[in-house]
Amino acid sequence: EAGVAQSPRYKIIEKRQSVAFWCNPISGHATLYWYQQILGQGPKLLIQFQNNGVVDDSQLPKDRFSAERLKGVDSTLKIQPAKLEDSAVYLCASSPDAGGYTGELFFGEGSRLTVL
Amino acid sequence: AQKVTQAQTEISVVEKEDVTLDCVYETRDTTYYLFWYKQPPSGELVFLIRRNSFDEQNEISGRYSWNFQKSTSSFNFTITASQVVDSAVYFCALRRYSTLTFGKGTMLLVSP
């Protein structure tokens, strides 16, 4: 079974530029998550999708971050314009249970963003 | 509000030593789930275990064991006879409904 795929693995940009990250979850997984992991900290949830609908985006900085999962499969996370504090690893995860209540999350390897 | 505290930032041991990683959580819910994840240098978080709040039985899986105590709100993780391959960052996490809250992680360094 293929795991969660993310790209690019690494990205370096200058502040005020834009960047996009792509995630393809495990086939059949209804729930998809984007987490931000700043160096030395645990992952923090940015947004959760169930199929193509948003379940929780309360911690997404909506003035600069956006995410979509148009067909309920793969997803894109965009940052525009980027700030220095956005330097982090962006982790995508998926879960097979539709409600996302009890199941484990399966994580991708992450996309490491450096903002100069 | 939910909170997970992993007070140990970094632990260094020599191979074959036993090591315990501490996790203390805060929640007002009666139903919740606790998790441990491993993050090796490759970056991918790997699921290790899930416990629900109604099951306080300790669990053992090979060299890994977990001690869940509701009375102290702790869910500690012990690796017996540690190996170099155990070197990673370990995260404890608390799940309420669909929200998973992670601790800051404990970096474990196992030297030969």
Image (spheres, rainbow, N blue to C red):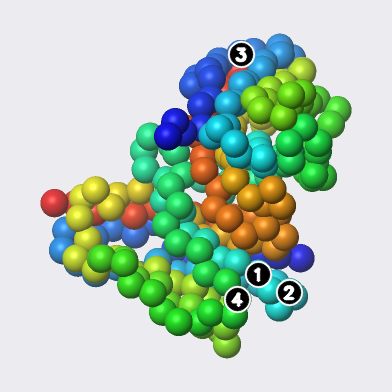
Same subunit, tags 1 and 4: yes
Q: Quadrant of residue B48?
A: bottom left
Q: CA distance from mark 1 to mark 2?
A: 7 Å
The residue carrying mark 3 is A13
Q: Closest to the observer: A48 or A44?
A: A48
The residue carrying mark 2 is B29
Q: Nearer the viewer, mark 1 or mark 3?
A: 1
Q: Residues within 10 Å of mark 1 (few under 14, many from 20)?
A: some
Question: Callout 1: helix, strand or loop?
Answer: loop
Q: CA distance from mark 1 to mark 4?
A: 5 Å
Q: Look at 57% across and 87% down and name the residue there.
A: B71
Q: Residue A61 appears at what percent x and percent y? A: 80, 34
Same subunit, tags 3 and 4: no
Left or right for B82, reference B29: left
Q: Are marks 2 and 4 in contact (CB under 8 Å)?
A: yes
Q: Residues within 10 Å of mark 3 (few under 14, many from 20)?
A: some
Q: Which mark is residue B53?
A: 4
Give the residue type at disc 2: Asp
The residue carrying mark 1 is B32
Give the residue type at disc 3: Ile
Q: Quadrant of residue B81?
A: bottom left
Q: Are marks 1 and 4 in contact (CB under 8 Å)?
A: yes
Q: Residue B11 appears at what percent x and percent y? A: 34, 59
Q: CA distance from mark 3 to mark 4?
A: 44 Å
